[in-house]
Amino acid sequence: MVYEIHSPEETEALGRRLGEALRERGIKRAFITLDGEMGVGKTVFCRGFASAFGITGVKSPTYTVVNEYRGGGASIYHFDLYRIDGYDDLESIGYHDYVESDGYSIVEWSVRAEDEIPEGAIGVVLERTQIESDRRITISGFQL
Ligand SMILES: Nc1ncnc2c1ncn2[C@@H]1O[C@H](COP(=O)(O)OP(=O)(O)OP(=O)(O)O)[C@@H](O)[C@H]1O
Ligand SMILES: [Mg+2]
């Protein structure tokens, strides 16, 4: 499904809708990829996703690679794999343990770990358009 977005608030709202849909349908474990160029709004989307569980204060995990949040009975593992290089790097941050545990793994720059995306992942791709604050967001693998 493709969404035409006109502001950061709309991106955040779409992230929230995804979180709410999972929560309402009782889906307690999911792997969500967030891809698109630098500054396109991946972290903004994740902030919205987390807000569906009453979680605030989501910040970019760029230097820590993964941030863990808990709220509304859910765990969210927010990754940024921009600096990741290969299987060993992923292993050293506990990636595989996170992926197998209950909760939502939401992964910026999943393209850096293409071979390590579990089956059934929900894909979110963000793209810029001609207009500065517009984005095209495509969600695959899940019907909102
Ligand atoms: N429609 C939009 N959706 C999301 N962000 C937008 C939009 N329009 C403008 N922005 C701005 O773009 C920036 C997006 O920043 P964000 O940190 O979410 O990007 P990112 O994709 O996570 O980047 P990085 O790859 O560096 O982690 C914010 O400053 C936000 O205000
Ligand atoms: Mg980011």
Image (tube, rainbow, N blue to C red):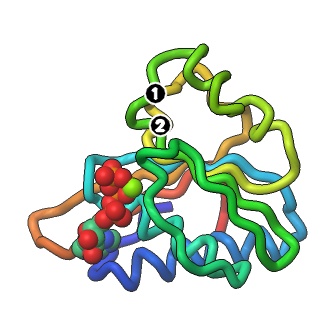
Q: Is residue 120 left or right of residue 114?
A: right
* 6 or 16: nearer the viewer: 16
Which image quarter: residue 18? bottom right
Q: Residue at x 51, y 45 (%)?
A: 64
Q: Is residue 126 visible?
A: no
Mark 2 is on which residue type?
Leu
Work out whether 76 lies above or below 95: below
- Circle 2 packing at 10 Å, graded few (<14), some (14-19), many (20+), is many
Q: Secondary structure at mark 1?
A: loop
Q: Is residue 92 visible?
A: yes
Q: Residue at x 42, y 70 (%)?
A: 44
Mark 1 is on which residue type?
Ile
| Residue at the spot of label 1 | 84
Residues at badges 1 and 2 in contact (C-beta under 8 Å)?
Answer: yes
Q: Position of residue 78 (x, y in %)?
A: 59, 53
Q: Which labelled disc corresponds to residue 81? A: 2
